[in-house]
Image (cartoon, rainbow, N blue to C red):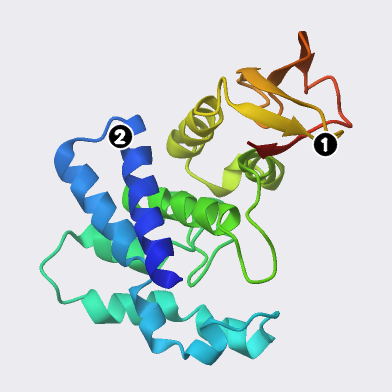
Amino acid sequence: STQAHSMNVAIISRLIGTWAGMDKADLDNVTLAGLIHDIGKIKIPDIILLKPGKLTTSEYDFVKKHTIFGFEAIKDQRIDKRIKDAVLLHHERYDGSGYPFGYKGEKLCNYACIVSIADVYDAMTSPRVYRGPTCPFDVIQIFEKEGFQKYDSRYILIFLRRIAESYLSEKIKLSDGRTGKLIYVNAHALSRPVVMVDGEAIDLRKEKDLKIMEIM
């Protein structure tokens, strides 16, 4: 639901801000930005918002307007301008490939940059109508593949590293069905850590046909 997603994005945004060394005032602001980032979705009819299948082009174009609707709803509120910017710009990308304006990094404030990472991460890891939740290491790999240039390097690398490290010592299941535990995170290949399986350390950077299927 939009409500659960907004809570998650608030929590993740605060985590990123904490890991990046923000002070309390900034942390409170970026948390609020995460909480209300999708407020414009109240103007999108449920029939489109909750549609289980793929949206048509015109439906998708309408959904994309939620950033503008959200900004319109809060632009006169007495809150930090960067919170309003995060609502408007959380779908912009650092390389200019986002919407609604195709802004590049220098035009994006730090709150928008943080909320955009939290938003994408939560959308990818949460179960959807048409698929189960995605394993965090698959999500990290998607970020790696997409290229970090879409996101602010001050936040994306520290966030993904801390996410990967949070699973150290956790029990994992590999794609060949074996189970083991995560023992080491490769800083330059965050989605391919080292796992201990049956007393053997397996470096997933070298075992290209193996991957972590799930955290157990």
Q: Is residue 17 above or below residue 103?
A: above
Disc sitting over residue 18 in the figure = 2
Q: Quadrant of the C terminus?
A: top right
The answer to which image quadrant residue 19 occupies is: top left
Query: Secondary structure under badge 2?
Result: helix
| The one of 172 and 138 positioned closer to us in this rendering | 172
Which residue is tagged 1? 175
- Mark 2 in CB contact with mark 1 (< 8 angstroms): no
Q: Is residue 78 above or below residue 147?
A: below
| Residue at point 86%, 28% (across, down) | 208
Instruction: Judge from the rendering whether residue 201 lies leftward or rightward of residue 4; answer left or right.
Output: right
Question: Which amino acid type is shown beneath numbered disc 1?
Answer: Ser
Residue in front for this viewpoint, 135 or 89: 135
Residue 91 in picture, x, y percent from top left: 49, 63
- Horizontal and vertical percent position of residue 53: 70, 80
Q: Secondary structure at mark 1?
A: loop
Check disc 2 and give the amino acid type.
Answer: Thr
Toward the viewer: 39 or 130? 130
Residue 26 picture quarter = top left
**Residue sitting at 49 percent across and 61 percent down?**
92
Left/right of residue 70 with respect to residue 191 in the rendered view: left
